[in-house]
Image (cartoon, helix red, strand yellow):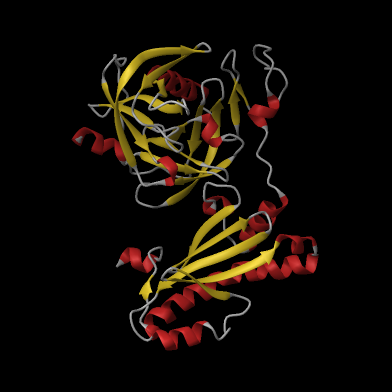
Amino acid sequence: METIEGIKNAVVKIVTGLGNGSGTYLKNQGIVITNWHVVRGERKVAVHLPNGEKLSGQVLVTNPKRDIALVVLPHALDLPSIQFSQAKVTQQERVFALGYPYDLPFTITEGTVSSPEHVDQEMKYIQTDAPLNPGNSGGPLVNQAGEIVGMNTQVYRDAQNIGFALPVEYLLEELDMFKEDEVSDGYNVRCPDCSGLLADAAEYCDNCGAKIAVEAYFQERPLNSTEQFVEDQFKKHDMDPVMSRKGMPMFWEFYAGSAQIRIFVYRNDFLFATSPLAKLPRKNLVELYKYLLNDAVSPYRFTMTGDVIYLSYRAHLADLVNPEQRDRIGHELFSIAAQADKLDNLLVEQFGCKWAAQSKQEAEA
């Protein structure tokens, strides 16, 4: 496993407004390679590094036919260099799938190669029994030498541990084309027939004349009215909403000082903002309860789940149709951040509460 230690720090998490996946940072090229279906419909994604840092990634090149995408970052990273295997995998070879399944921390699963060249719809795949789950897509499949032999891309959902990875030859071909094309900006799609780059949506490839699935390849994911409202509020507060997306529909998360702030839609009726402030202390509960019940933080409310005290805010989605209500809700929705950052300290210092597990203070303790 020591050979895998070197590559794991180059494996990143990719988060969008609909889900999350994995990717590998390629130091020599300065890009992240992942699956197209991980970033489909997006122009910008959040890239979470192993050290917890978040960067904004631009989707630079997509190859829908091979399900490959290249994401460029704002600057070069000092992460380990990785090696691609020069040899094809063999049946029963031991392999490891690296990535971030189900939004969990970095995970390694082990398996063996069942078929080194499974063919499906004119595409070759490595079939393996290494457990793959949602979130593993785009992460590397590596051999015992810590070399990339493929990229995890799909599973049979009704089967047990039947997963597939794109073989390393496809990845190397994509990187060779990327180097040859010298593309550095914009959003570019590879033609499914000639692999030429299309920088603009067109019904037919201007190189070979092949018909292009414009909607599938070029359409950017539209935001619904509630998503647009929330993300506009992020921008008003000089925050990039892409960096706060949680990887599920209509859910955002960010920090204000020590306090974690979550914004989400509940049952398609309510817009919530909530922050886990602190845990109940063992003593002085009467005085604490008196404070929590005095309604001193309106329009916010103290709530509790188990032993955790939350600061919460709720607005009905129907109120967003009224411009005056929209302005009020937008202001209150984000003002909770400053309140939460102040109140968690108050609860700890004045009432002897313990930091919530999600608090940055807890993480640094």
Which quarter of the image is occupied by the N terminus? top left
Image quarter where the C terminus lies is bottom left
Q: Residue at x 73, y 68 (%)?
A: 327
Residue at image coords 54%, 40%: 58
Q: Is residue 37 left or right of residue 223?
A: left
Percent across and percent down for residue 303 are 52, 72
Q: Residue at x 48, y 73 (%)?
A: 341
Is 87 above or below relative to 139?
A: above
Which of the 4 quarters of the picture holds residue 192?
top right
* Residue farthest right in this picture: 322
Q: Left or right: where does residue 153 sit relative to residue 3?
A: right
Is residue 218 visible to us here? yes
Q: Nearer the viewer, residue 202 or 89?
A: 89
Q: Please tell me in which quadrant of the rendered image residue 231 appears.
A: bottom right
**Which one is nearer the viewer's eye here, 202 or 166?**
166
Indicate whether 267 appears above or below 275: above
Up the image or down, 280 lies above or below 262; here it is below
Q: Position of residue 16 (x, y in %)?
A: 54, 44
Question: How many numbered discs?
Answer: 0
Give the x, y percent position of residue 93: 26, 19
